[in-house]
Image (cartoon, helix red, strand yellow):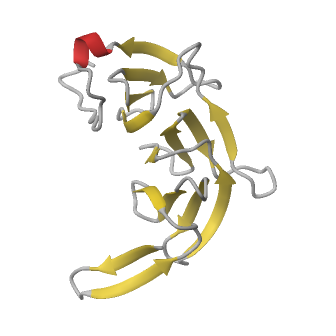
Amino acid sequence: DVILWDLTARRLMKRLSLHKVLVAGLAFNKDDTMLATLGGRDDGRVVVWDIAQGAAIREERSNSATVVSWYKNDVGKLVTGGNGVTFWSYKSPAGGKMVSTAADLGQLKRKVLCMSGDNEDKRIYCGTESGDILNISMNTAKPKLVTKYSHREIGREGITCVVYCNDNGYE
């Protein structure tokens, strides 16, 4: 279950129950009206929740996703990572189904542990278990790998946290 608390009043606000056994990841959208959750290995679903209703409004099978991040400028889109990277739109006319697009990573096979998008929703940076950071384009019809920063440059222990910050226009 996902349990939402009002910490000021010290009371339970909502209990969101749908995943089996484990919730592997979660993220709120930028205005905190929606929540995306990822079920664990036994569940394998990405679920989008409407916080005010306390109800799941979309749910789809994911590709072993363990990390999720929302777009910063489009409340209808999110990205999941795990065995690869998948881009999702939950506001689709496809009969209530979410539309998903797998990022084109070429021949790379990486397990994504963390991710952070830029402020314009152009790129998402994904830290991997092998120690690489993947720079993936977000604002195209087919998201694709732009650059891979090698573990020789970064580190060999895996990347467990990535934070995007714009340093005076230098990215």
Q: Is residue 31 shown left or right of residue 22? A: left
Residue 11 picture location, percent across and down? 30, 88
Residue 48 picture location, percent across and down? 57, 60
Q: Is residue 149 shown left or right of residue 90? A: left
Residue 29 picture location, percent across and down? 43, 55
For this rendering, which residue is in front, 4 or 44? 44
Residue situated furthest left in the rendering: 168
Residue at (21%, 82%) from the top-left corner?
Answer: 8
Residue at (71%, 49%) from the top-left corner?
Answer: 92
For this rendering, which residue is in front, 3 or 169? 3
Q: Is residue 141 visible?
A: yes
For this rendering, which residue is in front, 39 or 72? 39
Residue at (77%, 51%) from the top-left corner?
Answer: 93
Looking at the rendering, which quadrant does residue 164 occupy?
Answer: top left
Q: Is residue 98 shown left or right of residue 116? A: right
In this rendering, the count of numbered labels is 0
Residue at (61%, 43%) from the top-left corner?
Answer: 88
Task: Classify 25 as above or below 110.
Answer: below
Task: Classify 87 as above or below 1.
Answer: above
Residue situated furthest right in the rendering: 95
Looking at the rendering, which quadrant does residue 128 occupy?
Answer: top left
| Quadrant into which the C terminus falls | top left
Q: Is residue 170 visible?
A: no
Residue 114 picture location, percent across and down? 37, 38
Task: Classify 122 as above or below 41.
Answer: above
Looking at the rendering, which quadrant does residue 57 occupy?
Answer: bottom right
Task: Classify 79 as above or below 144.
Answer: below
